[in-house]
């Protein structure tokens, strides 16, 4: 009797935990597009590093992407044994470093941009939460910034031309500690 009560209690508690978890959608990194990321070089207010992502449509069909996508991001630092996670944020996450799948748990909003075959567009964005993790540890550090976007299930259902897979771009840079300011 005690065993069945214990199993019932465990089952009920696991159901309540599962009900509280947000819906997740997993998608593969897109082969229909190519995405590149670099700092934009433009001045933004308040002072922050702005990035630009160029997305090129490599497919033979027109695809749509949000004009201002909410990107997920990950910053890693190169250490002796390989890349180590420093920080990540945003609504989109990479499932595993060795796996090319992205998880999206948020809804998309805003206007869409059409990308005709062999055309590209630029997407400008700032990552204020990533600022501290993009600073060097020592005199020189090698950092890798990865940016992700994946459409939500609702968006794919409403928009048949929406890019059905995840955008992903990576920027690897050596950062040097600046001179001390007095």
Image (cartoon, rainbow, N blue to C red):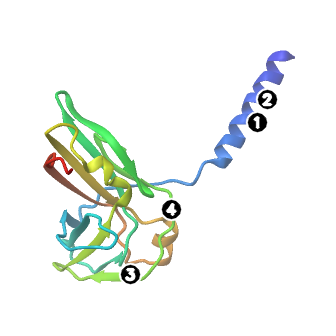
Above/below status of 48 relative to 172: below
- Disc 2 designates what residue? 8
Residue at x-position 18% and y-position 55%: 171
- Disc 3 designates what residue? 112
Marks 2 and 1, Cα distance to the nearest angstrom?
A: 6 Å
Q: Closer to the observer: label 3 or label 2?
A: 3
Residue placed farthest to the front in the image? 182
- Disc 1 designates what residue? 12
Q: Toward the viewer: 93 or 172? A: 172
x and y percentages locating residue 26 in the rendered image: 43, 53
Counting residues from the N terminus, which is met first, the one under dot 4 or under dot 1? 1
Q: Residues within 10 Å of mark 1 (few under 14, many from 20)?
A: few
Counting residues from the N terminus, which is met first, the one under dot 3 or under dot 2? 2
Residue 94 visible in the shown view:
no
Marks 1 and 3, Cα distance to the nearest angstrom?
A: 42 Å
Q: Residues within 10 Å of mark 2 (few under 14, many from 20)?
A: few
Marks 4 and 1, Cα distance to the nearest angstrom?
A: 27 Å
Q: Which secondary structure, mark 1?
A: helix
Residue at x-position 28% and y-position 81%: 62
Is mark 2 in CB contact (under 8 Å) with mark 1?
A: yes
Residue 131 visible in the shown view:
yes
Above/below status of 45 relative to 167: below
């Amino acid at each position: 009797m005690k065993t069945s009560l214990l199993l019932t209690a465990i089952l009920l508690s696991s159901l309540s935990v599962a009900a509280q978890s947000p819906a997740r959608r997993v998608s593969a990194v897109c082969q229909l597009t190519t995405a590149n990321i670099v700092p934009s070089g433009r001045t933004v207010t308040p002072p922050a590093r702005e990035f630009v992502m160029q997305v090129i449509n490599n497919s033979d069909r027109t695809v749509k992407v949000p004009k201002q996508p909410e990107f997920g991001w990950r910053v890693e630092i190169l250490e002796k044994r390989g890349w180590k996670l420093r920080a990540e944020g945003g609504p989109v996450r990479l499932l595993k470093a060795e796996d090319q799948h992205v998880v999206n748990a948020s809804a998309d909003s805003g206007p869409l941009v059409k990308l005709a075959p062999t055309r590209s567009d630029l997407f400008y964005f700032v990552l204020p939460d990533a600022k501290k993790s993009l600073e060097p540890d020592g005199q020189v550090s090698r950092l890798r910034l990865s940016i992700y976007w994946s459409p939500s299930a609702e968006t794919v259902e409403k928009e048949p031309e929406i890019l059905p897979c995840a955008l992903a771009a990576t920027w690897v840079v050596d950062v040097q500690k600046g001179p001390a300011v007095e």
